[in-house]
Amino acid sequence: MIEERFLILATKKIATSRASNRLFFKTRFFHPLFMVKFSLMKNKISQNYGAAYKHLFHQKIAIFIKTLSLYKKSKIQVETMPFFLKIKKSLKVKTTLIIVFVLLIGIGVSSGINMIKVKNKIKEALQREIYASGLLVRNTIEVNLEYFSLENLSGMSEFFHSILESNKKLSHLFVSDIHHNILYYTDYQSAHDSLNRPIHNPSESFSSEWDITECENYYETILPLFVLKGKRREVIGYIHLGVEKKIIDQEVFDLIVSNLAVFISSLIVSIILLLFFISRKVTHPISTLSLEMKSIRKNMSFKRKLLIKGEDEVGELGKSFNSMLEEIEKYSDHLEELVTLRTENLNAANRELKKNSDQIQKELKMAQRIQLAIIPNQKTFPKTKEMNFGGQYSALEDVGGDLYDILRVGKNAYGFLMADVSGHGVPAALVTTMAKVSFYTNTSWNKTTGETCAGVNQEIYNFIGDLEHYLTAYYCVFNLETGILSYTNAGHHPAILFNPETKKTVTLDTKDFFIGCLKNVEYKTREIKVEKNDRLLLFTDGIVEARNGKRQSYGYERLMKCIDQFGGLPPSDFTAKITEDVLLFEDGHPTHDDKAVLCIEFLEPLLLEKTEE
C-alpha cells in the first residue's frame, strides 16, 4: 500500500542517519484512521556525539510525525457513521433497553423473594413427611419392644431399610439412648456427626408438632422413644431422621428454573409484541414524518399529505404536520403576491421616511442658519477704535448649545456673553436663543452684571425649571468711560485676562450658581481695571475638556501654553489658532461637545465723556 511504502521510506531515512546506532521501528496501521505506533530501541549512543545525535534524532522524529499528520489530512476522508452508532440512536432500541432493564430488575427481585418462599414451603412439606416417617418408626419400635430390647434393634434392620426405601428423600436414620449412645444406625457418619453436638431437650425441641433441626449439610428431625412405667411415659431414647440440604436446594432450583423458563419465554414474546406495537404506532410514523420532511427540504414541494391515522399523540402530530404543509403551500402560492405587496409598502414607507428626513434636514439647516445669524462673526462684530474682536464657533450637530454675543450697554459700554446650555441639538439651540433674548432684555446701564444674571435666571427658570436643561454663563460689561470691566460667572469656566507684552495673566471668577436650576438666586459682581493691549478670553468647556484617543483632556495648561505662544496675534487669528490646536490634540478622536471661543483686544485710550442716563 502507499501508506506502508511511505512509512518504510521514512523509517529507513531515520534509521540510517547514524550507522553506529540500532533503531527498531514497529509499525501498525488501522486504515482508514492511519494510526502509527512506534516502538523505538536504542542500544548505545556514542560518547563523543551523544548529545548532538540525541537532538538530531528528536528533530527527525518530530519532522516524521508532522509529515504523517499532513499525509493523513490530505488522504483520509471521514467515513459514514458506523451501523452500531445508528442503532444506539434508535428510539425503538432505547425503549426496548429501558423495558428490558426494568423487567430484569423485577425478575431478579421477584425471583429472590420466590426462592425464599418456595424453600420455606418445601422445607415445611418435608417436615411433615419426615415427621410422619418418624412417627411410624417410633410406633413400630415401641410395639416391638416386647420382643426386642432397645440395645438390640438389629432384628428390625429390614424395617428400617424399608423406611429409607419408601422415602427416598431421607438420607439417614439412627436410634440413640438417652446417654447419646448409638443403638442402631443406617449411616454411621451421620449418626456420629449428629452425636458430636448436644441433642436438644425434647420438651423444647418438640413443643411444636412441626419442629425441625437445621444442621450443617442436612435437616434432621429427632423424636423421643417412650416406655410406660405405670401411668407415666418415660423417655428411653431418640429416633433421628435426616434429609440432605442439597435435595431441598435442588427442588427449589428446579422449580425456579422452570418458572424462569416460562417467565422469560413470556417476556420475550411480550417484548416482541411491544416492539411491533412501538414500531407500528410510534417509530414508523415518526420515521415517515422525518423522511417526508427531508424530501420536502430537498424538492421544495409542499403538495404532500402524510398518511398517519389515529387519535393519539402521533396521530395529532401527523395532523399538525399536514396542516402546516397546507399553510406553507398557501403561503408559497401567494408568496410572489405577498412579496410584491410588501415591496410596494416598503417603498412607500421609504419614500415617506425620505420625505420626512428631507423635511427635517431642511428644518435643521434653517435652524443652523438662524443660530449662526444670532452668533456674531468677523463680519458682524462691532467696529470700534477701542476694541478688536475674534471668535470661533463649532457645533457638535447641525445646531448646538454654545453661544457667545456682544451687547451694547448704553452709549459707552459693551457687554460680552459666553453661555453653554446642557445637552445638544435642537432643544439646546432653542434655549440658547432664549438666553440671548433674555440677556438683551435684562441688560441696562444702571444694572450690575450680577443683577442682570439674576433677572435672566428668573426668566429661564420660569420656562425650563421643570425640565432637565440648564445653562452656564459668563457675563461681563466693559465701561469705556472708566476702563472698568465688571463680571459675573454663573457656573461657567472663568475668563482669562492677559497681556501679550507684559505676559501678565489674571483669571476672573465669581463662582456663582448655574442659570435655570433654582429660583431667586443672587449673583455677585466683581470689577477689574483694564489696561491698554490687555486681552480677554472667553470659552466653553468644549475647549478645555476636549479629549484625545488616550482619554487625556486638553486642559488649562495647554490653553495657557497656547496663549503664551499665540496671544500676540490679532484676535481673529488667535481664536483660530486655539481651535486648530484643540483639533490637533484630538487627533481625529470623535468630539463630544460644542466649541466656542471669544477674544476681545483693548486698544485706544478710553473716552472721557460721561454718559447721562
Image (cartoon, helix red, strand yellow):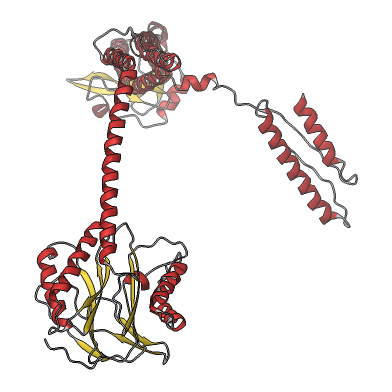
Image location (x, y in percent) of residue 130: 32, 14
Placement of 607 over or under 539, stated as above or below: below
Q: Residue at x 86, y 42 (%)?
A: 22
Quadrant of image for the C terminus: bottom left
The location of residue 193, given as percent across then percent down, is 44, 27
Identify which residue, 95 or 262, lies in the foreground. Answer: 95
Whether residue 422 appears in this view of the structure is yes
Residue 174 visible at all:
no
Q: Give the total of numbered labels.
A: 0
Q: Nearer the viewer, residue 454 or 444?
A: 444
State left or right for residue 214 relative to residue 84: left
| 137 in relation to 611, above or below | above
Quadrant of residue 128 in the image? Answer: top left
Residue at the image point whose x is 29% and y is 7% from the top: 309
**Residue found 31% across the figure and 92% down from its top:** 605
Residue 559 in percent (x, y) is at 40, 78
Q: Position of residue 462 (x, y in %)?
A: 9, 66
Near-viewer residue (146 or 449) = 449
Q: Is 297 rendered above or below residue 22? A: above
- Left or right: 80 as drawn, with respect to 496: right
Tell me the quarter of the image containing the N terminus.
top right
Image position of 66 (left or right of 257): right
